[in-house]
Image: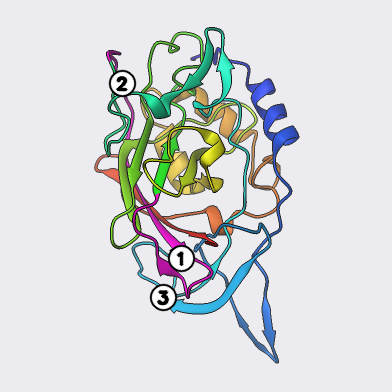
């Protein structure tokens, strides 16, 4: 079994200590006996803000039914390993955002002179950015920086053995539909955290060069059944025991609710998986 060789206790403690105060936007809107569920359409700006505008959701990027309320996605910690210029590794400040080639859709390989490819079950991640202050309109021309750990639970640029790698990190600009799509691998479950993917939202590609320019930081909670299926495959052995010891209710980030951060998912271990999530920001 692989032994995780970066300090996960430190990572979890950092998450718990640095996590911004969140206000759940999962509110039941009472109207007599009628109740409408809030589905996976996230948001930004005020952590407790929601848009009262309801939209007919695209099944490829919303929750399990066709109707969703455009809501503010919770603000989350970037954690110990963001690589966005906000912290350092043993060699100094780490900023993947300034690497040549960081603007890309396939993030499985290292860039800028580094060699290496992250192995794992294929995963496609589609995020749709919407404006909670403008009837959930799609936001074109914004930038999304996405990163996560490897199937061994290691973060490139930080974890022992992969500090010379920068894979599983990338930036893209949202298209006319407010969408970006990344090709990556299914991340591991490491000790103390529910399996997740990090991302930050920037007002433009030009601004996506340092963390101080970001307008939102959040995380994606990966669905349980698919985690179980993936972790039973080659290379994910350490995730099995780690996953058995954590739940959404005990996770330091998702314990106050993860509905707005849980994507739709399709696919299989053999064919690969695809997830999709609406991310709202109040701009």
As rendered, which of 252 and 104 lies closer to the eye?
Answer: 104
Q: Which of disc 3 and disc 2 is earlier in sequence?
A: 3
Residue 11: % across, % down: 64, 25
**Magenta-drawn stretch contains 3:** no
- As helix, strand or loop, the secondary structure at mark 1 comes to loop
In 3D space, how far apart are the residues under numbered discs 2 and 3 (Cα atoms)? 38 Å
Q: Quadrant of residue 100?
A: top left
Residue labelled with disc 1: 63
Q: Which of disc 1 and disc 2 is earlier in sequence?
A: 1
Q: Residue furthest left?
A: 271
Image vertical order of residue 81 relative to residue 21, above or below: above
Rendered residue at 33%/50% (across/down)? 180
In 3D space, how far apart are the residues under numbered discs 2 and 1 (Cα atoms)? 33 Å
- The magenta-colored residue range is 113-142
Q: Quadrant of residue 13?
A: top right
Does the image show residue 168? yes
């Amino acid at each position: 079994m692989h032994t995780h060789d970066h300090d996960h206790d430190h990572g979890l403690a950092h998450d718990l200590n640095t996590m911004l105060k969140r206000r759940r936007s999962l509110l039941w809107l009472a109207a007599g006996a009628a109740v409408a569920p809030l589905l996976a359409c996230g948001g930004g700006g005020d952590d407790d803000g929601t848009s009262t505008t309801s939209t007919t959701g695209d099944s490829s990027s919303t929750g399990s039914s066709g109707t969703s309320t455009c809501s503010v996605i919770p603000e989350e910690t970037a954690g110990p390993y963001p690589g966005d210029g906000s912290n350092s590794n043993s060699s100094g400040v780490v900023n993947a955002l300034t690497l040549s080639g960081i603007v890309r859709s396939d993030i499985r390989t290292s860039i800028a002179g580094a060699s290496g490819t992250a192995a794992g079950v294929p995963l496609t991640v589609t995020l749709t950015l919407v404006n909670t202050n403008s009837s959930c309109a799609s936001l074109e021309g914004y930038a999304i920086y996405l990163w996560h750990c490897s199937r061994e639970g290691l973060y490139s640029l930080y974890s022992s053995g992969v500090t010379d790698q920068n894979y599983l990190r990338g930036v893209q600009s949202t298209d006319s539909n407010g969408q970006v799509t990344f090709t990556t691998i299914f991340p591991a479950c490491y000790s103390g955290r529910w399996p997740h993917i990090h991302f930050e939202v920037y007002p433009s590609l030009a601004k996506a060069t340092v963390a101080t320019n970001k307008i939102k930081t959040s995380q994606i909670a990966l669905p349980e059944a698919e985690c179980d299926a993936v972790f039973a495959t080659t290379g994910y052995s350490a995730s099995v025991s780690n996953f058995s010891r954590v739940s959404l209710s005990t996770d330091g980030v998702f314990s106050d609710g993860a509905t707005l951060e849980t994507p739709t998912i399709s696919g299989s271990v053999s064919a690969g998986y695809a997830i999709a999530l609406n991310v709202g920001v109040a701009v």
